Image (cartoon, rainbow, N blue to C red):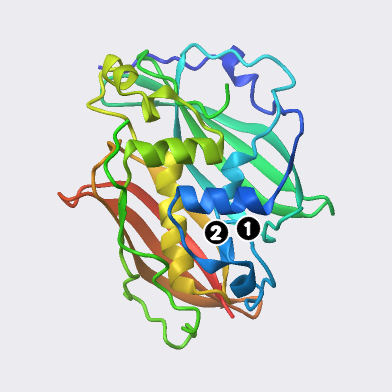
Amino acid sequence: MNKRRILTKEMLQIIGTESETNKFKVYKENIIRFAESIQDYNPLFNNELEARKSIYGGIIAPPTFLRSCYPGPWKKSIQLPFYTSVDGGSDWEYFEPIRDGDVINVTAKITDLYEKSGHKEQMLLQKTTIKYINQFKSLVAKEENIGIFLEKHMHNEDKYPFSNIKTKTTNRFQNSKNKIITYEDIYIGMELPTIIKTPNSQQLVKYAAASLEFPEIHYDIDYAKDAGLPGVLVQGSLKHAFLGQLITDWMGQNNILKKLSVSYRGMDIANETLYCKGLITEKYIEKNHNLVKSDIWIENDKKIKKTFGEAIVQIN
């Protein structure tokens, strides 16, 4: 039996809609707070003395810090038939590091809208391009985000509008500052050092405050259960940040993350153990730069993978 079509010509008219510009001043304290919220102890993100010894010359922001900088309101009304929206994932491309004192101008544009059949319901997928431009008019990063609109009214995880168990993480920055990774050392099939995370609701609250994302399903157990969930959900963007940490820990302080793409295909509940893993899949030279591509993912104790991604690193 054919699925009914839900996408109309009127809905497609939202393609091309642009947002107003939002402006954010970056402070070192906010960078450190964000790194602490994801339990990332890389000196690049929290130790000025050590960060000055790197190629960056000072503290920079973690890869997904820009989640805390969001675009302004849409310039025209956006009307879609479903209330519930969830974050399907993002492709990030990085051009310059984010530093203390930077002023980031954020704009968005809807670039596509299409429908897809889920297991039990129809979905609308909205693709949005978000650009982050600093005070020097330089494009520092670009994000391609997929927002998923669901028929079922369960919860709203749109990024815009407590358990007290000790949070566990296995690494307090695994890659020594003295460790140098060379292009010659890297080989296809090489495994990245695993990071193990057990985020509890306390960490989810800290991350919500650092990233300015406050959907109730990530901290209110009663709200989550009323929505039919077994517990509060780990933010998709927090899992994205964990995989960013996996890459930056491995690559060291003198290489450059160029791309980080992550998609979410399932929910993870607070207090579950998450294993962040990666595998080198390709190494190549492009425009005289040594580049390495890796598959990255998160799996649980049952080895079920719900978060998948890919990263590209420039090895200097």
* Mark 1 surroundings: few (<14), some (14-19) or many (≥20) residues within 10 A: some
Question: In the picture, which quadrant includes the N terminus?
Answer: top left
The reply to whether residue 235 is visible in this rendering is no
The image quarter in which residue 234 lies = top left
Image coordinates for residue 255, horizontal then vertical, percent: 57, 74
The image quarter in which residue 136 lies = bottom right
In this rendering, position of residue 99 left or right of residue 45: right
Relative to 10, does residue 28 appear above or below in the rendering?
below
Name the element at disc 2.
Answer: strand
Q: Are marks 2 and 1 in contact (CB under 8 Å)?
A: yes
In this rendering, position of residue 89 left or right of residue 76: left
Q: Which residue is mark 1?
A: 94
Relative to 269, does residue 228 appear above or below in the rendering?
above
* Mark 2 surroundings: few (<14), some (14-19) or many (≥20) residues within 10 A: many
The image quarter in which residue 122 lies = top left
Question: Who's the residue at 74% across and 21% down the image?
Answer: 75
Name the element at disc 1.
Answer: strand
Question: In the picture, which quadrant includes the C terminus?
Answer: bottom right
Image coordinates for residue 93, horizontal then vertical, percent: 60, 55
The reply to whether residue 21 is visible in this rendering is yes
Which is nearer the N-term, disc 2 or disc 1? 1
Question: Who's the residue at 26% across and 26% down the image?
Answer: 119
Q: Which residue is mark 2?
A: 259
The amino acid type found where label 1 is placed reads Tyr
The amino acid type found where label 2 is placed reads Lys
Q: Residue furthest bottom?
A: 184
Q: CA distance from mark 2 to mark 1?
A: 6 Å
Question: Who's the residue at 40% across and 38% down the image?
Answer: 204
